[in-house]
Each structure stands twice: as C-alpha cells, then as structure tokens.
Image: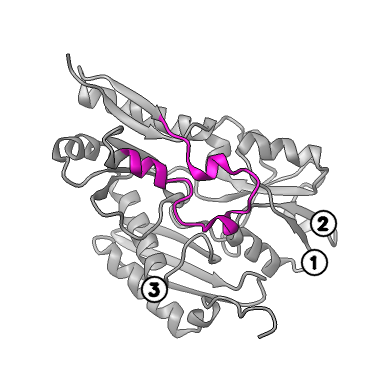
C-alpha cells in the first residue's frame, strides 16, 4: 500500500484552507499516492492570551510543525510564510512557494468608511508590532489594543469590544470568503506588509529528495524570488516578529524592486528605502537593501530599548 504524503499544518480555519489548497494541487502530482493533513498545535495556538512579543516571537506558529518534520510525523510543512523565521532550521529547506495571494493589510470597521476619517483617539485592535508602529507613525493619537486570536475571533472582538476598527491581513480575509468585511486596503506607501505576507511556504527535510521533487511542482518562480529577497533583507537586518519592519516587492520585465521600512515600536522614527536588481539574484537585492537601510540609520532603530531607569 502506498504511504500517504503528509502535510503538517496548524488547525485554524485559515491554516486548513492553506493546507487544503496545497493538498489539492499536490494530489495530481503524487497520484496514486494519497495526500493527508496532519494537524499540529503550536505554541502560538495554545497561548491565545499573551502578546506575541511576550512569547519570544520567533517560530511560535512554526516550530512545532518543523519538529513534526524532523520526527517524520509529516513530510511537508505548510506555513504562512510571514510566520516562518528567516534563521535557517538545520536539516530543513524551504522548497517551494505557490503563487502569492494579496499581500496588503486591511482596515475593518463597522463605524468608519475609511482609515483617514477616524476620529482623534480612536481605538484600533492589532496583534502586530509592525502594524502598531506604522499606525502610530501615521496617527500618533490612536489608542491601540492587543488583539489575539484567529480571523473569526478578531472579527467578533471588533463588535464585542466596540472597537473603532481592526487591522487584518487581506489574504486571510479573502481566503476565508470574508473579503466583503474589508472596509479599506491600507496604502502600502505607509502601511508596508510583513515579509512574506500573503505567501504560503512549503518546507521539507533537506535529505528527502523525493518529496522535494514533488513539492517543487508548486513553485511559482516570481513569488519565490520576491519572498527570498524580502527574507534576505529581514535576515540581514537581524529582525523578526519583535522588530517593526515592513516591505513591498514587485517584478517587472525581470527587474525585482524591493522597498523596506524600519520603525521604532512607538512609530516616532522611520527609515525607508527602495532598491532594485535582477530578479534572478533575489538574495543580493535583499542584502543590498538592508545595507542601504542600515546606512541611513536603521541600525539605531533596531537596537532594543534601554532598561527602565537607565
């Protein structure tokens, strides 16, 4: 009997949508071998109360799935790529990224038709330091509250806590059939998305050549080059979930253009730069943009704040 190809995934509705999307595209590739989902609870799923920054940030939604790969309980890890740390995991390899979904950040409100008409002191919910810093850079008068939970939970909290609005990833809403809940897609000129936002990352064991070959059928080259550049920038900056860093990317006529922003957590200071290069050398483009940002003062913004009283 042919053993199934096992996809490791979180159990949220959005994670299962992503895993089933991948499974549906892998089935004709691996047939007659079946494809199965292995649902894995991560640290971030178990702790719904703590702020992500208080949980250490790195790998809270991915480490348990990577462990399942190492333990051979799964053959492929299906990640929201924005959650996957840029520090390589020994023995594992990011093999493919399917075509990217929408990468923007969505403003959702029952009270206001656009972000720019929010009244002074409006209360906005978000769990992201990146979003928080960019919101405060744009509107330092806002009151921001930490908002954890899956997409559906956050939408319930919008009404239940009588918030003026919340910020969610556009891709998650679209994939769950909730695009009609979007009030406005925020302008990426000032609200730069997270590295890898809207993309799904497929990770395999480095020594599993057969699975890597099968999964590579789902590779979208432009998406892969874009996210490699974004992740190279983030890695070179030494940032992760604990640092407000945003990016946009595009490929036109073989040229990859990458834009990045680094902010202080309070949003008061912001360094932004753009760099372009051949799409075939995404790591160089990302590293070069990081060097530009550091030369323009981003390094100072990336330093942790001094302890109280210092």
Q: Which residues are magenta?
A: 39-68
Q: Which residue is mark 1?
A: 141
Q: Looking at the image, which residue is at 34% across and 43% down?
A: 67
Q: Which residue is mark 3?
A: 289
User: Which callout, 1 or 3, points to the residue nearer the camera?
Assistant: 1
Magenta stretch encompasses residue 24? no
Q: Position of residue 135 (x, y in %)?
A: 68, 62
Q: Earlier in the sequence, mark 2 or mark 3?
A: 2
Q: Which residue is mark 2?
A: 122
Pointer 2 local density, CA inside 10 Å: few below 14, some 14–19, many at least 20? some
Mark 1: secondary structure: loop
Q: CA distance from mark 2 to mark 3?
A: 35 Å
Q: In front: 99, or 34? A: 34
Residue 3 horizontal side relative to residue 145, left or right: left
Q: Looking at the image, which residue is at 60% across and 56% down?
A: 128
Magenta stretch encompasses residue 50? yes
């Amino acid at each position: 009997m042919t053993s199934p190809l096992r996809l490791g995934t979180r159990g949220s509705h959005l994670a299962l949508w992503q895993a089933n999307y991948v499974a549906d595209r892998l089935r004709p590739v691996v047939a007659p071998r079946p494809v199965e989902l292995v649902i894995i609870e991560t640290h971030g799923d178990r702790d719904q109360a703590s702020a992500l920054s208080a949980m250490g940030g790195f790998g809270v939604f991915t480490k348990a799935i990577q462990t399942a790969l190492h333990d051979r309980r799964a053959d492929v890890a299906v990640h929201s790529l924005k959650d996957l740390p840029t520090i390589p995991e020994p023995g594992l390899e990011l093999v493919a990224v399917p075509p990217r979904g929408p990468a923007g950040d969505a403003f959702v409100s029952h009270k206001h038709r656009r972000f720019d008409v929010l009244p002074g002191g409006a209360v906005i919910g978000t769990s992201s330091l990146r979003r928080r810093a960019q919101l405060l850079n744009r509107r330092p008068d806002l009151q921001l509250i930490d908002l954890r939970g899956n997409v559906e939970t956050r939408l319930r909290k919008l009404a239940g806590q009588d918030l003026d609005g919340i910020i969610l990833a556009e891709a998650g809403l679209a994939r769950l059939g909730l695009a009609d809940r979007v009030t406005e897609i925020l302008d990426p000129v000032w609200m730069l998305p997270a590295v890898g936002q809207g993309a799904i990352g497929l990770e395999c064991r480095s020594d599993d050549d057969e699975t890597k070959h099968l999964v590579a059928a789902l590779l979208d080259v432009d998406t892969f080059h874009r996210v490699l550049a974004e992740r190279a920038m983030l890695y070179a900056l030494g940032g992760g979930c604990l640092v407000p860093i945003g990016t946009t990317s595009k490929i036109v006529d073989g040229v990859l253009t990458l834009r990045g922003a680094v902010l202080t957590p309070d949003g008061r200071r912001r360094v932004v730069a753009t760099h372009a290069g051949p799409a075939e050398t995404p790591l160089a483009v990302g590293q070069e943009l990081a060097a530009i940002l550091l030369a323009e003062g981003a390094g100072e913004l990336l330093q942790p704040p001094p302890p109280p009283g210092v």
